[in-house]
Amino acid sequence: MKNPTLLLIMILCAGMSAHAQIRINDPGKVVERQAENRANRKIDQAVDKGFDKIEEGIGSLFKKKDKKSKNDGESQTEQTDSETNTGAASAASSGDAAPGTMPKPTLQSYGKFDFIPGEKVVAMEDFSQDAVGDFPAKWNTNSSGEIVTIEGTEGKWLMLGPDGVFYPEFIKSLPDNFTLEFDLACTSEMSYYTARLRTVIAQVASPMEEFGHWGTYNGYKKDAVEVGLHPKDAGGDQGNTAFVVFGGQAGQEFMQNEKSFPAFHVPDHNLVKVSIWRQKTRLRLYVDDYKVWDLPRAFVPETKYNFIAFANGGYSVESDRYFISNIRLAVGAPDTRSKLITEGKFSTTGILFDVNSANIKAESYGVLKDIAGVLKENAAVKVKIIGHTDSDGDDANNLALSKKRAESVKEALAADFGIDKARMETDGKGESEPASPNTTSEGKANNRRVEFIKL
């Protein structure tokens, strides 16, 4: 497979390989070749503004990493969900990172992370069904954008064009309790003057009528909540900014937080995981393991939120670009204590693992901490931990993998949270007991779960 090196502001012209990957080191050099391939582009001016310059062979935004073997266990669909090479570049990471790779976060490095995803996945988007070079089929926009790959990362990304709103048409209602997670990347030399990338949660009647050309929600209405991220603050190139705008009965509120998110200002690793948690009126926002906001009254109870979008107010430098991927929407407020102690069974999709591996991902910390708390409060309770997979891959390998993952959860609860191993048994069911049909990404995500059965 050919993987020509591209600058981050560019896309392949017609006739070049559809499997190109994005690479960038010095966006400033782009200006020298702005018109190099404009004649080959036959799309509207909005696309031309940012996507019509090609450069080969200059560095990379994400340095190449060795890819893991995919000869056993679950398929690429699961791999996209269960391993996304993101996270904070934590000092508590075990061992030194290989040159050009992110130090891998550990459960210990996420010790203050209390995010717990919703109990049922209702929407997932990893763009696996879309071709590189296309705008995703299940999305809409008033701007432009396309699917790309980024060297050194798994899966596909949506590269956002200038001055616009980008929204998944398949999300049509949002309950009082939900979680939204996604990966966010940007170019290595992002301009301070480029607008923040906004995540909009709103009640709308007609999305394209209510959102302006510049990607800003008109008037910050009380039926919308926005959170925004930018990789640099007003002080220069070592900080980040985050803001939230939310509506209320007395008007709108605007709050700002300046925090250096390690992964979001290192030139070779401008990539973070964003987690948003709504509980009725409460809003929590996390970037990697850092809790940016915990606001008790951000959402309006009477508002029927039905819309999620990513709004880009414009790139100051044409080489700037935002990218999003691995979007996961889950609903329901997990009640671990009630389900495990009263009902005798608790199931979670919030414990994630590396690809074809029993290694637990660091962002699982909040769920594990919650389960450990219930077990500590009920010292006489014993549990059986059961791993499950989706139906992709070999049956025998999936069965073995599910057993290993259950054992890893047991070891983590013992080593990191002090739960006596004698209180925990393990087992694995592989793909034999699906919770949902294995016909959609959402169904497969709900089948990749860990159950706790009260003994």
Image: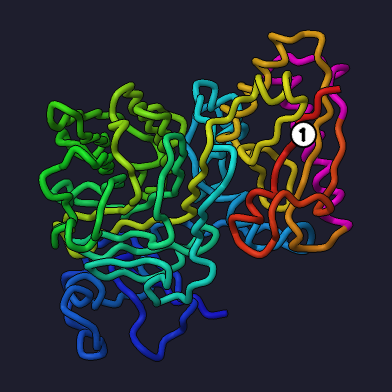
Res. 28 visible in picture? no
**In magenta stretch: residue 413:** yes
Which residue corresponds to the image point at 40% horizontal and 27% vertical from the top-left? 291
Q: What secondary structure is found at the residue carrying circle 1?
A: helix
In this view, the residue in front, 59 or 375, is 375
Relative horizontal placement of residue 234, taking residue 79 as reference (left or right) = left
Residue shown at 19% from the left, 81% from the top: 44
* Count of marks placed on residues: 1
The x and y percentages for residue 170 are 43, 61
**Can residue 446 be seen from the camera position used here?**
yes
Query: For this rendering, which residue is in front, 101 or 14?
Result: 14
Q: Quadrant of residue 176?
A: top left
Write the residue at 33% across / 42% down: 304
Q: Nearer the viewer, residue 103 or 361?
A: 361
Splitting the image into 4 quarters, where does residue 146 fall? bottom left
The quarter of the picture where the N terminus appears is bottom right
User: How has the structure been colored for display?
Assistant: rainbow
Q: Is residue 15 above or below residue 53?
A: below
Q: Amino acid at mark 1?
A: Ser
Binning the other alpha carbons within 10 Å of mark 1 as few (below 14), some (14 to 19) or many (20 upward) gives many
The chief SS type of the magenta part is: helix
| Residue 24 % position (x, y) | 35, 63
Q: Give the residue number, with chain letter if any, for mark 1.
A: 408
Q: Which residues are magenta?
A: 396-425
